[in-house]
Image (spheres, helix red, strand yellow):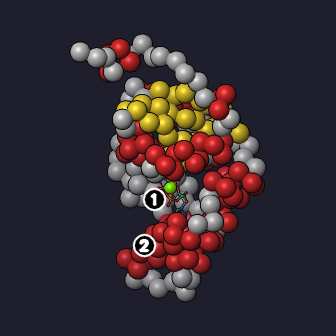
Amino acid sequence: MTEQTLIILKPDTVQRGLVGEIIQRIEKTTLKIVAMKMVYASKEQAGTHYADDKEWLISVGEKTLKSAEKKGIKLSRTALEQGQWVRQMLMEYITMSPSVVMVIEGHNAVAKIRMLCGGTSPQEASPGTIRGDYAIDSYMLADASDRPVQNLIHASGTVEEAKREIKIWFNENEIHTFKRVDEDLIYRKG
Ligand code: ATP
Ligand code: MG
């Protein structure tokens, strides 16, 4: 299935000069960059992207709670409270300096890019993935440092999520239609 996904190379990627490295990995898969720009995210964009959605907030908070539990630490916040705190931190983080946003298109683009990114916490992300290779952060370190997990890249989790997110960052006329030369190999008929 040809689909589109949204990528944000977050401020830590731009500040650490890793934009080129990461784009190269994406381009080499044969997935196609159909939109790309550098943005200084507004508070409004950040708040819409990291939506105030109870289910997502709880899932985010549970990651810290589970990680603490593994270390025998019991935190006083509930998963929802932890998630709300992370959301506030994420909104500050994503607006602190520029990010690079992209729309990537191709066969199974959403799942493929998520695999390339690796797990949310770089500490647990597999070697060979972007988060596993270029970062070492963990939920515990982020929590102790009063900031969200710095994991370089955001990628949409589902096709539906991608459709919602692309609209936050791009106008329709910024998303381009063109053919890469390798498409004849990948998508040819017969
Ligand atoms: P993304 O949506 O950024 O691609 P993801 O889907 O793996 O990553 P989400 O659960 O959607 O993870 O969380 C969004 C972002 O919030 C993460 O990329 C990370 O920067 C941060 N984050 C998530 N959970 C936590 C947590 N428990 N503590 C600190 N930061 C967190
Ligand atoms: Mg997500």
Q: Would you place residue 58 above or below residue 9 in this image?
A: below
Q: Residue at x 45, y 57 (%)?
A: 120
Q: Which residue is mark 2?
A: 67
* Ligand 1 neighbours mark 1 (CB distance < 8 Å): yes
Q: Residue at x 76, y 49 (%)?
A: 42
Question: Could you tell me the amino acid type at mark 1?
Answer: Ser
Mark 1–mark 2 Cα distance, whole angstroms, equals 10 Å
Question: Could you tell me the amino acid type at mark 2?
Answer: Ser
In the image, taking residue 25 as reference, residue 39 lies left or right, namely: right
Q: Which residue is mark 1?
A: 121
* Ligand 1 neighbours mark 2 (CB distance < 8 Å): yes
Q: Secondary structure at mark 2?
A: helix
Q: Is residue 147 visible?
A: no
In the figure, residue 28 lies in which quadrant? top left
Percent position (x, y) of residue 105? 47, 31
In the image, taking residue 166 as reference, residue 110 lies left or right, namely: left
Query: How many numbered marks appear?
Result: 2
Q: Residue at x 45, y 49 (%)?
A: 158
* Quadrant showing the N terminus: top left
Q: Residue at x 41, y 46 (%)?
A: 114
Percent position (x, y) of residue 39? 71, 39
Give the crowd class for mark 1: few <14, some 14-19, many >=20 residues within 10 Å: many
Q: Tell me whether circle 1 and circle 2 mark residues in contact (CB < 8 Å).
A: yes
Residue that protrudes farthest toward the left in the picture: 190
